[in-house]
Amino acid sequence: MPKAYWIANVTVTDPSRYQGYQAVAPAAFAEFGARFLARGEAETLEGRAWQRRVVIEFDSLEQARACYESKTYQAARAERAGACEADIALIEGLD
C-alpha cells in the first residue's frame, strides 16, 4: 500500500491566535503516526507565494484522511480559523 501525504500551504495572519493551533495539532498527528518531512519557508518559483509549506507523511491515504477528519484535528482546525490562510491537499504516494 502506498504512503500518503498532506501538502499544506499556509500564510499566518494572526500569529498569537495561530499558537492555539500549534498547541493542539501535534496530538492529532501523533495519534495517526504522521511524520513531518518538510516544514518551513520555501522558495516559490511559480504560483502563489505562501509563508510556509508543510509535507506530512502517513502510512496510507485512509490514515491521512482519518487524521484530517478526527475530532482531535478538527479541534485544532477550529483553533486556526481566522488565524491563517491555508490550502491543504491529500495525495497518494507512488508504490
Image: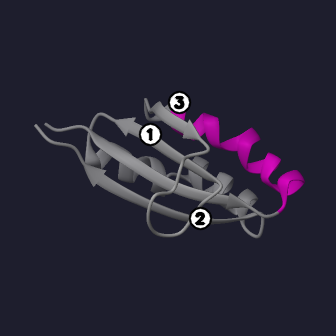
The residue that disc 2 covers is 86
Q: Over which residues does the magenta segment extend?
A: 14-30
Label 3 Cα neighbours within 10 Å, binned few <14 / some 14-19 / many ≥20: few
Label 1, secondary structure: give it.
strand
Q: Amino acid at mark 2?
A: Ala
Residue 57 falls left or right of residue 1: right
The residue that disc 1 covers is 56
What residue is rendered at 28% in x and 48% in y?
A: 62
Marks 3 and 1: which is nearer the front? 1
Residue 49 falls left or right of residue 13: left
**Residue closer to the observer: 18 or 64:** 18
What residue is rendered at 35% in x and 37% in y?
A: 58
Query: Is 1 covered by the magenta stretch?
Result: no
- What colour scheme does the image use? one colour
Which is more N-terminal, label 2 or label 1? 1
Q: CA distance from mark 3 to mark 2?
A: 21 Å
x, y percent for residue 12 = 74, 58
The residue that disc 3 covers is 30
Q: Amino acid at mark 1?
A: Ile
Q: Amino acid at mark 3?
A: Ala
What residue is rendered at 72% in x and 67% in y?
A: 81
